[in-house]
Image: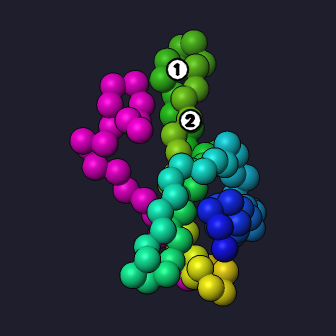
Amino acid sequence: MDVRQAAGTARAFIADLFEGEEIAHVGLEEVDFDEASNEWKITIGFSRPWDRKSVTPAMGEVRLTRSYKVVRINDESGNVISVKHRFFEASEWAEGGFRI
């Protein structure tokens, strides 16, 4: 499987798995291939309705936070092995957002 197939599999799996949770703003965040385990590790980010944080309540401005999930996919079979939450270290965050 190539990187596009792995990313598409991960995105489709997340959309199906979280179907009833009204996820939005689904996007590819990271891709990694682990040669030792022959697995793709694809990070997918998305927002859910309860992830909204009010920045200025008086003005009604809303800021969305994101959830990040790492989807592990076996390269040979294309089967999803696991989905885990992705935590970021404080050092990975820069002023104004995530540092890439």
* Residue 70 against residue 93 in the figure, above or below: below
Q: Nearer the viewer, residue 73 or 82?
A: 73
Q: Position of residue 65 (x, y in %)?
A: 51, 40
Q: Position of residue 13 (x, y in %)?
A: 69, 69
Residue receiving disc 1: 57
Tag 1: amino acid: Pro
Q: Nearer the viewer, residue 32 or 61?
A: 32
Camera-nearest label, 1 or 2: 2
> Sequence order check: which comes first, mark 1 or mark 2?
1
Circle count? 2
Q: Give the farthest residue toward the left.
A: 91
The kind of secondary structure element at disc 2 is: strand
**Residue 33, numbered label:** none
* Residue 75 against residue 94 in the figure, above or below: below
Q: Give me the C-alpha separation between circle 1 and circle 2.
A: 14 Å
Quarter in which the N terminus is drawn: bottom right
Q: Nearer the viewer, residue 56 or 22?
A: 22
Direction from residue 97 to residue 78 in the image, left or right: right
Asked if one can make out residue 70 in the rendered structure from this viewpoint, the answer is no
Question: 10 Å neighbourhood of mark 1: few (<14), some, or many (≥20)?
Answer: few
Q: Is residue 95 magenta?
A: yes
The kind of secondary structure element at disc 1 is: loop
Residue receiving disc 2: 64
Q: Nearer the viewer, residue 26 or 48?
A: 26
Direction from residue 92 to residue 9 in the image, left or right: right
* Residue ID at (66%, 87%): 77
Q: Which residues are magenta?
A: 81-100
Identify the image's colour scheme: rainbow, by chain, secondary structure or one colour.
Answer: rainbow
Q: Position of residue 48 (x, y in %)?
A: 63, 48
* Residue 27 against residue 61 in the figure, above or below: below
Quarter in which the C terminus is drawn: top left
